Image (cartoon, helix red, strand yellow):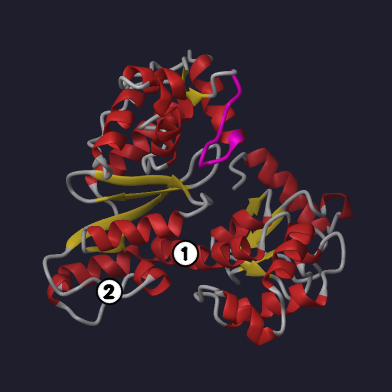
Amino acid sequence: MITSLAKKQEYYQALVDKNPEYDGIFFAGIKTTGIFCHATCTARKPKFENCEFYLSAEEALLSGFRPCKKCHPLSYPHDIPDEVKILINEVEKNPEKKWHEADFRELGIHSATARRKFNTSYGMTFVQYARARRMGIAFKHILAGTKVVDEQLSSGYESASGFNDAFTKIMGNPPKKTAITLVHAAIIATPIGRMISLSDAHYLYLLEFMDRRGLEKEIEKLRNKHNARIIPGKTPINQELEEQLALYFQQQLQTFTIPLYKDGSDFQKKVWSLLETIPPGTTSTYREIATRLGNEKAFRAVGNANGANQIAILIPCHRVINTNGELGGYGGGLERKKYLLELEKNKK
């Protein structure tokens, strides 16, 4: 999401003027209608304060906006194939649905064709599109639902049987009626994208970029393992986290003091502990970490443990690079990895 006031004003003026030079440059999310448009949309223009601006359609989807039916922002700059139109319409009929191979067959569409044509049109696969729309609805509930949830909690939520949180609706069945771990979800805006945090009164369980691939499965696994009820809301943990992340991105903080729940195997925990010893502004390699663990040949296992980290930035898996000096992989995307390394390298 664009946070610069000057850039937001520039994009808003382009939206008001229906300036074709900005088509494909940004997408405008309209908070009053829940849709997103491109610059030349002919619909009535919203007030400035009711607009949010995004550089990609996926980011707009993840923020809970659906494509405008008047300007069809996802069709820019080309007309979209009929198969893609059908799939988009099917998603809107049931945006919380998880798609399987049989669903494509029922529509007479081959799943490989859907992936290819979506990727050609939008730079993302159909699975990414459907997931972004589904997750966007969940995140929108989180952002909007805190007050309602607080009221339910104050009236005896833990003993109530009728309440399902937004994540449960999106990602699975309610937990069994045994001891429940109450976990709060919060959205944190950063200069490189929104992040979601999951925490209780004692620990931070998860901090991930909202567009990370596999995020749904991570959350579902966490919820099932801890028999957790995930609801929107603030905890002292995620409030302090938001403050510390703000200082970190302002280059005013290097060491985080948030208590972390490291949910992994003994080997993974050893790797994550070593990651925390890599000083800001420096890097280590997968092989170096494997060597420190006593087996230099275990660098692939180190890479897998790195990828399994669910607490981004605080457990700094972004500081691990390939032996040849290349950045290697990163769940949040290589551009973010590069940004974080430069941020720490050029600390004030």
Q: From this viewpoint, is residue 233 visible?
A: no
**Measuring 79% from the left and 58% from the top, which residue is drawn there?**
120
Q: Nearer the viewer, residue 52 or 323?
A: 323
Disc marking residue 174:
2
192 in the magenta segment: no
Q: Position of residue 228 (x, y in %)?
A: 23, 62
Q: Is residue 203 above or below residue 272?
A: below
User: Going from the N terminus, do you reach mark 1 or mark 2 first?
Assistant: 1
Mark 1 crowdedness (10 Å alpha carbons): few <14, some 14-19, many ≥20: some
Q: Nearer the viewer, residue 76 or 224?
A: 224
Mark 1, secondary structure of its residue: helix
Q: Nearer the viewer, residue 157 or 171?
A: 171
**In the image, is 338 to the left or to the right of 138?**
right
**Measuring 47% from the left and 18% from the top, which residue is drawn there?**
283
Q: Position of residue 301 (x, y in %)?
A: 40, 34
Using the rendered view, name the quadrant where residue 16 is placed.
Answer: bottom right
Q: Which residue is mark 1?
A: 140
Q: Nearer the viewer, residue 202 or 140?
A: 202
Using the rendered view, name the quadrant where residue 129 is placed.
Answer: bottom right
Q: Which residues are magenta?
A: 325-334
